[in-house]
Image (spheres, helix red, strand yellow):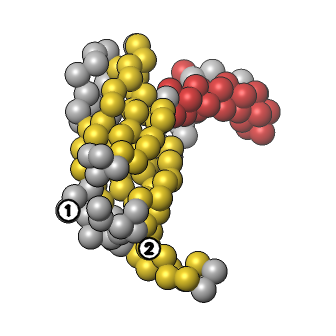
């Protein structure tokens, strides 16, 4: 970084080590504030399997300027695992918000229904994920 840029940022007056320490707290605070805003982007409320509709009922909690967010599902691969010497399947699904970058001005809640009729990976443990790293897992039975 040039001396002129450092001076305009208020970093040129102290020895380099003290300048970095002096501003580390400010930089860390800004980063934590930014991370906190991102974390609140979308999370889960109650999640359950509805056997009568053969679907997942997912409560999405998200921040934005409007309630008109639409969520889509992106399924991962079905994986077979050995769990206590019993075959078991797991699958992950990302829930994507079409307005993921909407300014976080108000909190909204929306029920999202995820049909499972065409899901071949059953019975299985389904792990739903949303950005940045919220997740919820539940077991779904074989097809009715």
Between 129 and 84, the residue placed more toward the observer is 84
Does residue 52 appear to the left or right of 8 in the view shown? Answer: left
Q: Which residue is mark 2?
A: 89
Classify mark 2: helix, strand or loop.
Answer: strand
Disc 2 crowd rating (10 Å Cα; few below 14, some 14-19, many 20+) is some
Residue 91 appears in the rendering = no
The image position of residue 28, as x and y in percent, is: 66, 32
Between 84 and 129, the residue placed more toward the observer is 84
**Split into 4 quadrants, where in the image is the C terminus?**
bottom left
Does residue 32 appear to the left or right of 63 in the view shown? Answer: right
Q: Which residue is mark 1?
A: 118
Q: Is residue 106 above or below residue 135?
A: above
Disc 1 crowd rating (10 Å Cα; few below 14, some 14-19, many 20+) is few
**Separation (CA) of disc 2 from disc 1:** 16 Å
Classify mark 1: helix, strand or loop.
Answer: loop
Residue drawn at x 40%, y 62% as measured from the top left:
141
Q: Earlier in the sequence, mark 2 or mark 1?
A: 2
Furthest toward the left, the residue is: 118
Tell me the quarter of the picture where residue 59 sits: top left
The image position of residue 123, as x and y in percent, is: 40, 68
């Amino acid at each position: 970084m040039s001396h002129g840029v450092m001076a305009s940022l208020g970093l040129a007056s102290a020895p380099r080590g003290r300048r970095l320490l002096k501003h580390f707290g400010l930089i860390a605070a800004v980063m934590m504030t930014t991370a906190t805003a991102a974390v609140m982007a979308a999370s889960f409320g109650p999640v359950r399997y509805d056997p009568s509709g053969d679907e997942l009922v997912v409560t999405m909690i998200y921040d934005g300027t409007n309630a008109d967010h639409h969520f889509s599902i992106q399924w991962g691969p079905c994986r077979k695992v050995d769990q206590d010497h019993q075959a078991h399947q797991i699958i992950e699904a990302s829930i994507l918000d079409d307005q993921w970058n909407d300014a976080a001005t108000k909190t909204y809640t929306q029920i999202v229904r995820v049909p499972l009729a065409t899901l071949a990976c059953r019975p299985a443990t389904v792990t739903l994920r949303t950005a940045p790293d919220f997740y919820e897992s539940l077991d779904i039975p074989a097809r009715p």
